[in-house]
Image (cartoon, rainbow, N blue to C red):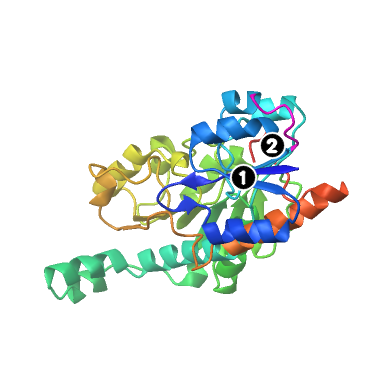
Amino acid sequence: MRLLIHIHDLPMWSLPSAQVHRIRQALPGVDVADVRDDAQAGALMADADVALATRMSDATLATAPGIRWVHSTAVGVGGLPLATLAARGIPVTNTRSVHADTIAEHALALLLGLRRQFPAAAFHRAARTWGQREMSIVTVPRLEATTVLVLGLGAIGERFATFASSLGMSVIGIRRDVSRSNVPGVVRVASLSALRDLLPTADAVVIALPHTPETHHVLGAAELALMKPSAVVINVARGTLIDEAALADALVTGRLGGAGLDVFTREPLAADSPLWTTPRTILTPHTSAFNGDYWTPAVDLFLANWHRFIAGEPLQNRVDPSRGY
């Protein structure tokens, strides 16, 4: 049996050689091919039974008549040809929930940092000015008086809701399946169709949705205009969920209280992006999932799924191709 590993997206998303070695040690008798370029992946895919990959083209998949399962070490599977895989009956699994705690903690840190004016403090530090007067007059609601709207109640959204509610915040969640409304820490669950009605009530909006055609630019100019001028937006999901030009304009003109962004439409963020200089903004370079060891738990999940696959048992984290997550 051949396992083809093709996870090589610089600078950060390349499976370390030590983890490849670990997989080989854990799967004796399996031909493990670790490839680092697309051409080589296409050449070796023909004999692969399983692919451990974050991206794949239809052309590459067409060369693989024997592929029986694809696993992604990422949560997002937009780089995989889901429709073609589904048409061939090939299951796809991903790494959702593995880093949920870390990402939810990051989202909370961004929210609290914005509320406590960390961007302003950083500005005054760089200018060597004592900004006490300016910062002291900004109204900061108590956590108990704060309503947070969480878009997406998957593992990350649910974990964030637990954190936020334990601090006294009131959490409203939006999810596709509103029948699953019993979520710890969430006072109300609504569908995406209720978003525009709920936005004016929120002091913060935390985005933890997958990117699909339905959620593309879920926060655009019209949605941002509905928000309180003091409200903040946190995005730890996908950059394409926000209209970045509209967000930058809302921040520059003071129509929005702030933004904490870990993901961007284009990564790395372009040097000429207005987001670099927008006021009341915290930017982190897509690091919310990192805590010093991103890869070990991701590989742990893959190896556990491998044994399920060999035993003919249901796979964990099965992706629904019709939904894209």
- Of the numbered discs in the image, which one, if any, rests on residue 33? 1
**Residue ID at (73%, 49%):** 30
The quarter holding residue 172 reads bottom right
Q: Which stretch is magenta?
A: 63-68
Is residue 139 shown above or below 299? Answer: below
Is residue 47 shown above or below 100? Answer: above
Please say if the residues under marks 1 and 2 sit with CB atoms less than 8 Å apart.
Answer: yes
Dot 2 surroundings within 10 Å: few (below 14), some, or many (20 or more)? many
Residue type (three-letter) at the residue carrying disc 1? Ala
**Residue ID at (87%, 46%):** 312
Q: Quadrant of the N terminus?
A: top right
The quarter holding residue 112 reads bottom left
- The one of 131 and 273 positioned closer to us in this rendering: 273
| Left or right, 76 with reference to 243 | right
The quarter holding residue 274 reads top left
- Of the numbered discs in the image, which one, if any, rests on residue 48? 2
Dot 1 surroundings within 10 Å: few (below 14), some, or many (20 or more)? some
Is residue 155 shown above or below 65? Answer: below
